[in-house]
Image (tube, rainbow, N blue to C red):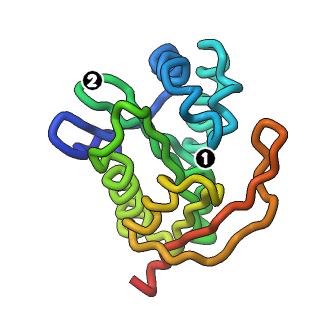
Amino acid sequence: MLSQPITEGAELRALEPWRAKEFHEFVVRSGPHLSPWMPWATDIDDVAKAERWLQGYADDQARDGRRVHGIWLHGLLVGGAGFATFDARNGTCSLGAWLAPEARGRGLVTRAARLMIEWALGTRGMSRVEWSAATGNIRSIAVAKRLGMEREGVLRSALALDGVRHDVEVWSLVADRM
């Protein structure tokens, strides 16, 4: 999956290290909105850190592991979706996504996640796609519901953000139950 249209004017593409400056600019624009849910939103405070973060994903993808894609709307990076884990041997992966506030309300995250799920289950033959969200992240939980995922439970105090512990809801799609 190199590039996929999401909607008119929007596409999902690989977010590669050579796009570090563009990614850093996105983090600067959207970081305050993302930081309550995405630990990396405060960590990526310069282009070099953005490049290292993206390179980590590129290196893992080269080993058939985790991977990250960007969401572009009319040529501007406005979000992303990535497999935070991708274990082809066991057929399991975990998917997450993020979006700039100005790009909300267009279904971009749901459509991008659906494309990635279709690729993981259909093309790669994965058996399970997991989605995790802090219990207070209502928008992320709504995406899991729109994707038809099943809520499996809550991991108590599983996520630390800015020194605060959060419970995390776990949602999933399992290929043989679709």
Label annotation for residue 169: none
Left or right placement of residue 120 versus residue 52 in this view: left
Q: Are marks 1 and 2 in contact (CB under 8 Å)?
A: no
Residue 46 drawn above or below residue 101: above
The residue pinned by badge 2 equals: 75
Q: Residue 89: give x, y in percent of width and height.
A: 61, 67
Q: Nearer the viewer, mark 1 or mark 2?
A: 2
Q: Quadrant of residue 101?
A: top left
Q: Answer few, some or many: residues within 10 Å of disc 1's Cα (few below 14, many 20 plus, some between 14 and 19).
A: few
Count residues near mark 2 (Cα–Cα under 10 Å), then give few for <14, some for 14-19, many for 20+: few
* Residue drawn at the location 56% of the way across and 70% of the way down: 171
Q: Is residue 30 above or below residue 38?
A: above
Identify whether 13 is placed above or below 109: above
Q: Nearer the viewer, residue 160 or 88?
A: 160
Label located before the other in sequence (1 or 2):
1
Q: Residue at x 36, y 68 (%)?
A: 122
Secondary structure at badge 1 equals: loop
Residue at left offset 75%, top offset 54%: 166
Q: Is residue 18 visible?
A: no
Mark 2 residue type: Gly
For this view, does 145 lie left or right of residue 161? Answer: left
Cα separation, mark 1 vs mark 2, equals 29 Å
Which residue is labeled 1 in the image?
63
Percent across and percent down for residue 46 are 64, 13
**Image spot of residue 123 (x, y percent):** 37, 64
Apparent side of residue 143 relative to residue 135 in the rendered image (left or right): left
Query: Which amino acid type is shown beneath numbered disc 1?
Result: Arg
- Measuring 53% from the left and 51% from the top, which residue is drawn there? 96
The spot of residue 136 in percent (x, y) is: 62, 55
